[in-house]
């Protein structure tokens, strides 16, 4: 019987300490991810963010806006790529401790973009190779070559959108540090989870336009919801946190469902 496919995106805020200016792993969450996934037999594809392994240096050298005249930028690109790959290897090594076999797909070596939200071609044949050998393909946000601006930040959210359009999994889950999309900043005492995120929800969040909601070199929550709305045309799409991931894999989703 064919296994049900689920595509997961682990945010950088989940697997790293995103508030740090230097690369810092969230070891506890890595262990939790391995423990949860090892209990389930779904066919997984994993995408992960960069968190403190990518955002600080990318922001400092303005990598999101492409090549410029800063002589230090080339080194910054190399360092960012090195750091996000290191994060990927740490995650994959953590999963291997739970006997979970993985196959890394490095975007900067396998993908090219026409602007930050337009991947020229998703190398699905490489993902298929992993799936066919019983491995979990694992990819991540990276600095890729770009036909329009030299380089760009290709976010894990955009990669996930491309994968979902191709594979059309039954479920696609963004695993963040908060258990869903809130009507205001999540730590505000009067905040509430929005159970169903629609185009109108997105419009309201954009109008609020608070720095806390949108700040991120890859577009933050707004960019994530925009990708999720496209994904929702092909897959049941949710935003939740690690506390609820096991519930999802047991068929009891909890969080915010995004609908197109």
Image (cartoon, rainbow, N blue to C red):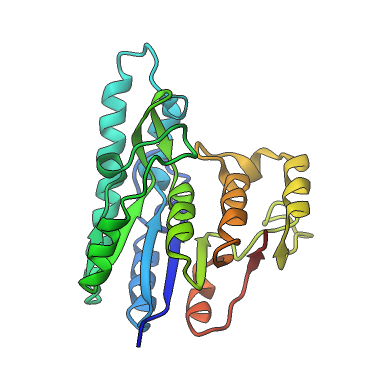
So how many labels did they put on this image? 0
x 25%, y 48%: residue: 86
Residue 229: x and y in percent read 62, 55
Q: Residue at x 55, y 58 (%)?
A: 231
Q: Is residue 57 above or below residue 137?
A: above
Above or below, 202 relative to 117: below
Can residue 193 be seen here? The reply is no
Q: Is residue 244 left or right of residue 194?
A: left
For the C terminus, the quadrant is: bottom right
* Above or below for 8 versus 61: below
Quarter of the image where one finds residue 121: top left
Residue 109 seen in render: yes
Image-based side of 218 in relation to 84, left or right: right
Up/down of 41 relative to 163, above or below: below
- Most distant residue in the bottom direction: 1
List x then y, in percent, for residue 40. Answer: 37, 82
- In the rendered image, residue 172, in percent from the top left (x then y), is placed at 50, 66
- Look at 34% across and 37% down and name the residue there: 112
* Residue 159 drawn at (x, y percent): 43, 50
Residue at the far top in the pictured view: 69
Residue nearest the viewer, comparing 124 with 249:
124
Residue appearing at x 39%, y 55% in the figure: 48
Quarter in which the N terminus is drawn: bottom left
Corner quadrant of residue 163: bottom left
Closer to the camera, 252 or 132?
132
């Amino acid at each position: 019987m064919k296994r049900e496919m689920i595509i997961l995106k682990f945010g950088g805020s989940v697997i790293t300490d995103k508030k740090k200016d230097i690369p810092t792993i969230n070891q506890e969450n890595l262990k939790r991810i391995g423990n949860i996934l090892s209990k389930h037999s779904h066919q997984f594809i994993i995408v992960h963010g960069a968190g403190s392994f990518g955002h600080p240096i990318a922001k400092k050298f303005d990598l999101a806006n492409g090549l410029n005249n800063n002589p230090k930028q080339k080194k910054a690109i190399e360092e960012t790529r090195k750091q996000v790959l290191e994060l990927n290897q740490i995650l994959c090594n953590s999963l291997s401790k739970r006997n979970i076999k993985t196959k890394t797909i490095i975007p900067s070596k396998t993908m090219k973009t026409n602007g930050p939200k337009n991947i020229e071609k998703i190398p699905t044949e490489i993902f298929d190779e992993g799936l066919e050998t019983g491995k979990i393909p694992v990819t991540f946000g990276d600095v890729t070559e770009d036909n329009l601006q030299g380089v760009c930040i290709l976010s894990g959210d955009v990669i996930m959108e491309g994968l979902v359009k191709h594979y059309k999994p039954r479920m696609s889950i963004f695993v963040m540090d908060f258990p869903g999309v809130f009507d205001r900043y999540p730590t505000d005492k009067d905040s509430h989870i929005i159970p169903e995120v629609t185009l109108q929800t997105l419009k309201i969040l954009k109008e609020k336009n608070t720095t806390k909601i949108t700040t991120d070199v890859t577009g933050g929550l707004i960019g994530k919801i925009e990708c999720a709305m496209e994904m929702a045309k092909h897959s049941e799409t949710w935003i939740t946190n690690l506390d609820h991931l096991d519930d999802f894999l047991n068929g009891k989703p909890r969080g915010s469902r995004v609908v197109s």
